[in-house]
Image (cartoon, rainbow, N blue to C red):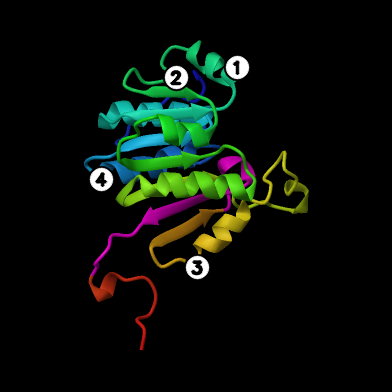
């Protein structure tokens, strides 16, 4: 916490020690989204370093932040450090499926997914979070760009990258993957496109 939460004295959220490294990229890009969306809250699946950035952003932009993790120990460790979670935040211990069923999550501007990395779980988490996302809101997903075959076992990146490949074909969202930073396993950024946009803002070429 002390190492990460040394913020550069500038208008965006930059950790002096991480900058673009590890989850520094999440802090910078989520700040960009929250700066431009004047409402909408924050949610994350999987607590840890990311929670430091999301808590800081929730305080900065006066938003609520919802945290979910299946590990009581992980939650307890984070709670033992003052400032790790925002006083306006909600912390849920349990599965992400139960999190979305049991917690009254308000509309979201930013979501972050770093829970179970296997395709079925990541897809379900994404579908649940995307349904809560405001137009132009963003979901960030970790572990979407394994650097080699060695990262494909379930205990590392798993096969969640398949979701990235599927999303790249969709017309209702924009998607970009940062291959560096984020522990070297990729951070995918997804924007929910508004409905009824003029033709010059539509994704892809118009149908003939």
Query: Considering only order in the chain, which callout, 1 or 3, is on the residue closer to the N terminus?
Result: 1
Residue 197, how many percent across, how many down? 24, 67
- Mark earlier in primary sequence (2, 3): 2
Residue at the spot 67% in from the left edge and 51% down from the top edge: 159
Disc 4 to disc 2, how far (Cα)? 24 Å
User: Gap in Å between the C-alphas at discs 2 and 1?
Assistant: 15 Å
Q: Mark 2 — residue?
A: 84
The image quarter in which residue 170 lies: bottom left
Left or right: 123 as drawn, with respect to 109: right
State the residue position of label 4. Answer: 37
List x then y, in percent, for residue 140: 47, 46
The answer to whether one can see residue 19 in this image is no
Q: Is residue 149 left or right of residue 101?
A: right
Mark 4 Cα within 10 Å, few/some/many (few <14, many 20+)? some
Q: Please provide percent x and percent y for residue 153.
A: 75, 45
From which residue to which does the magenta span run?
179-197
């Amino acid at each position: 916490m002390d190492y990460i939460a040394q913020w550069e004295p500038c208008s965006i959220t930059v950790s002096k020690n991480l900058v673009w490294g590890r989850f520094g990229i999440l802090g910078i890009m989520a700040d960009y989204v929250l700066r431009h969306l004047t409402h909408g809250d924050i949610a994350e699946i999987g607590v840890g370093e990311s929670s430091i950035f999301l808590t800081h952003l929730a305080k900065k932009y006066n938003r609520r932040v919802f945290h979910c993790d299946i590990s009581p120990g992980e939650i307890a460790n984070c709670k033992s450090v003052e400032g790790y979670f925002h006083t306006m935040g909600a912390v849920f211990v349990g599965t992400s499926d139960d999190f979305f069923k049991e917690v009254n999550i308000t509309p979201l501007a930013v979501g972050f997914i770093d829970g179970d990395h296997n395709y079925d779980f990541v897809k379900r988490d994404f579908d649940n979070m995307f349904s809560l996302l405001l137009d132009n809101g963003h979901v960030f997903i970790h572990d979407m760009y394994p650097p080699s075959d060695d990262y494909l076992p379930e205990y590392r990146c798993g096969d969640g990258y398949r979701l990235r490949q599927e999303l790249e074909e969709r017309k209702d969202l924009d998607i970009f993957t940062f291959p560096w930073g984020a522990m070297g396993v990729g951070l995918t950024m997804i924007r929910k496109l508004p409905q009824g946009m003029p033709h010059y803002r539509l994704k892809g070429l118009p149908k003939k």
